[in-house]
Image (cartoon, rainbow, N blue to C red):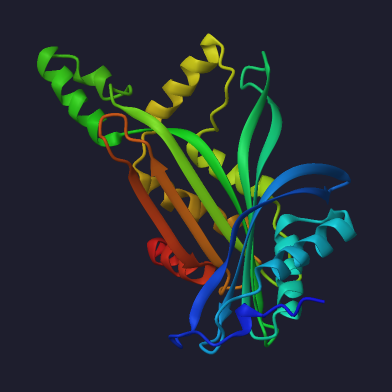
Amino acid sequence: MIDLVDVQAEKPKISIPITSVGLKGITYPVRVSRDNREIDLLTRIDIYVDLPADRKGADFSRKIEAINEIILENGVVPSIEDLSLRIAEKVLQKLPYSTQCRVTVSADYMREKKSKNGNSRIIVPYKLEGESVLRRNGESHKMVGVNVTGLNACPCAMETTRALISRDFPGNDQILNRIPSITHNQRNHVRLMVQAPAGRSIEADDLIGICEKVLGGSLHSLLKRIDEGELVYNAHKNPKFVEDIVRDIAAEILPRYSDFPDGTRVIVSSESEESIHPHNAYAEIDTTLGELRSSISKLDH
């Protein structure tokens, strides 16, 4: 028998603890059972642990073993965030030298809908995210998230073109001030993550609904002429900065999760693929429900 050296267990040349080390982009098929239906997802899994200063490396193969034992032996999971926590628990069992584990699971998610005019059946793509952090002392938290792509129109350029049109066509201010003006529009990518309190679950479809309410819908491949026209028209009737989008989504979260504790973490981001610039615009809110409630209550007084 060959005597194999455990290189990972050796002492490193430089004894500095590592905050996060692991594997990114592990691909696994997963079946989720939710609301009396089963959904097959092709997931991408990232696993990270901390590493003490006296250890050269982490045992990467044991992370893969943990995934195999959870997915292949269980077959069906209730949610990807639950899957992420189960994997984290198994990893810490296999790596006694680590004090915490973070696991993220993401997947493309398709929903069938009817177009707004009911003329066509469409498939709308989204991205789901589930993330768990588990510490050796048993402390844990889970987050559920979605990525939704919509359309936003710039309010700043709209008011500038309104002024230019008024200059070139004087005497029409009464109607110009009542209709949308010309502006640039672009795809907007929204990411919404909400922490799931202990014993509570969050439906990804609910998060998608919040994002689409603010964006005025999501983008999809099939647009007939009337659908295309209404998509553009509605975006211009309600122009938004990326700052407006994240604030509006944060405000929409409050009534939906009014019974969640103040410490519940919320992350909202909006990235706009600027059509008139070689760069993108970005805004993010990383807060808690308690802080959001405090901000909104100040506005009410």
Name the residue at the top extreme. Answer: 225
Q: Please state the horizontal and vertical placement of residue 225, each as a whole percent of the image.
A: 52, 10
**Front one among 274 and 206:** 274
| Residue for point 54% across, 29% down | 219
- Farthest residue in the front direction? 1
Q: Quadrant of residue 97?
A: bottom right
Relative depth, front residue between 271 and 103: 103
Please tell me which residue lies in front, 80 or 185.
80
Question: What residue do we see at 38% from left, 61% from top?
Answer: 299
Q: Is residue 49 above or below residue 44?
A: below
Give the vertical position of 64 relative to 1 (above or below): above
Name the residue rendered at 49%, 45% in the picture: 190
Q: Residue at x 85, y 44 (%)?
A: 38
Percent coordinates x, y for residue 106 in the rendering? 64, 51
Query: Can I make out residue 99 in this image?
Result: no
Which quadrant of the structure image shows residue 141?
bottom right
Image coordinates of residue 120 in percent, x first then y, are 67, 15
Q: Is residue 22 above or below residue 30?
A: below
**Is residue 254 in view?**
yes
Q: In the picture, which quadrant includes the C terminus? A: bottom left
Q: From the top left corner, tell me how far across and down residue 107 is, in percent.
A: 66, 46
